[in-house]
Image: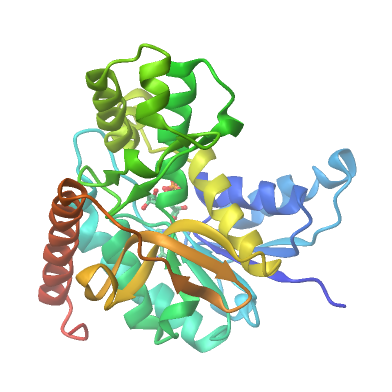
Amino acid sequence: MARKKIALIGSGMIGGTLAHLAAKKEMGDIVLFDIAEGMPQGKALDLSQCGPIEGFDAKITGSNDYADIAGADVVIVTAGVPRKPGMSRDDLLGINLKVMKSVGEGIKNNCPDAFVICITNPLDAMVWALREFSGLPHNKVVGMAGVLDSARFATFLAWEFDCSVKDVNAFVLGGHGDTMVPVTSYTTINGIPVNDYAKIKGVSESRIDEIVDRTRKGGGEIVGLLGNGSAYYAPATSAIAMAEAYLGDQKRILPCASYVEGKYGLDGLYVGVPTVIGAGGTEEVIEIELSDEEKSNLKVSTDAVEELLEACKGLDEGLK
Ligand code: APR
């Protein structure tokens, strides 16, 4: 059987990390695409030379030509401009919307059967726009945010409780931004609801609230520390987990920015919800019971996403 083909659109910090992870896991042959000339070719060469040391077989190439992503099984999109200190995700809208248009057309013309994972921010708006521009079915275009946000939540909880991250199952809903909704009622420490475990360990409610707040601002915290870019190791690791769920038909339930129509009272919007990912792409959105407070937090989050979509429609006549 021929190897799978993974196209990475954007070969910057996340793109390069994605290529390294995908190669190490022998997920398939990899094409690093970028508009910058030489850079994807250089990274491809550098990464190829890891092969003999790490012992992976993967053909890694760099390209500035969309024809080279032809027939890709998975496309992961990081093309765009990352957030700079002091810049909100939403400031990125105008610039990255234009990028999504060219990427969407490149995918439509070269690999319309691919499973497409978008990482570019502002995520919930960019994944929607990418789907519109590419014309792919909604179940084949998804955004990576919830896996990362839940990983951040899980990390902070594991530190607080001094427990293994493997035992933390953290749950985050809503848009990828400061309005995201970490859902403590579905967050467990090896099955024990987090609020119960907090009582057992003498951790106060206000401390859990602080952790929730830190999770919401998790991306910005890293932007502030790095000084000239945004997070890339955990975002890349998150998207790889989603790609593996698709390629391996794993039917994992992962929080992703999926297209929601009907469920959660939403009418055609990409937003973070628990989603079954398997060979059919995003196969099912799982609707969970929420408390009134969680519902109203989710509404704030989805309203913010809707506002961004309206702004996108104002910026590009082709979007309606
Ligand atoms: N087509 C292809 N690649 C593009 C385009 C385009 N139209 N415009 C920009 N790029 C490339 C840049 O040349 C750069 O190499 O996208 C790459 C982005 O890489 P980085 O600047 O290193 O950004 P990164 O940290 O990888 O983040 C990418 O993910 O988390 C989000 O907010 C983040 O939107 C940003 C994206």
Q: Is residue 175 left or right of residue 151?
A: left
Of 295 and 199, nearer the camera is 199
In the figure, 179 relative to 164: above or below? below
Across and down, in percent, residue 236 comes to 54, 47
Q: Is residue 74 left or right of residue 116?
A: right
Q: How many marks?
A: 0
Residue 144 position by quadrant: bottom left
Q: Quadrant of the C terminus?
A: bottom left
Ligand 1 position by quadrant? bottom left
Across and down, in percent, residue 279 comes to 63, 75
Q: Is residue 71 left or right of residue 311?
A: right
In the figure, 99 relative to 172: above or below? below
Q: Residue at x 85, y 40 (%)?
A: 54
Of 187 and 261, nearer the camera is 187
Residue 100 position by quadrant: bottom left
Would residue 182 be visible to someone looking at this image?
Answer: yes
Colour approach in the figure: rainbow
Q: Residue at x 60, y 51 (%)?
A: 18
Would residue 38 be visible to someone looking at this image?
Answer: no
Q: Residue at x 26, y 78 (%)?
A: 262
Q: Quadrant of the N terminus?
A: bottom right
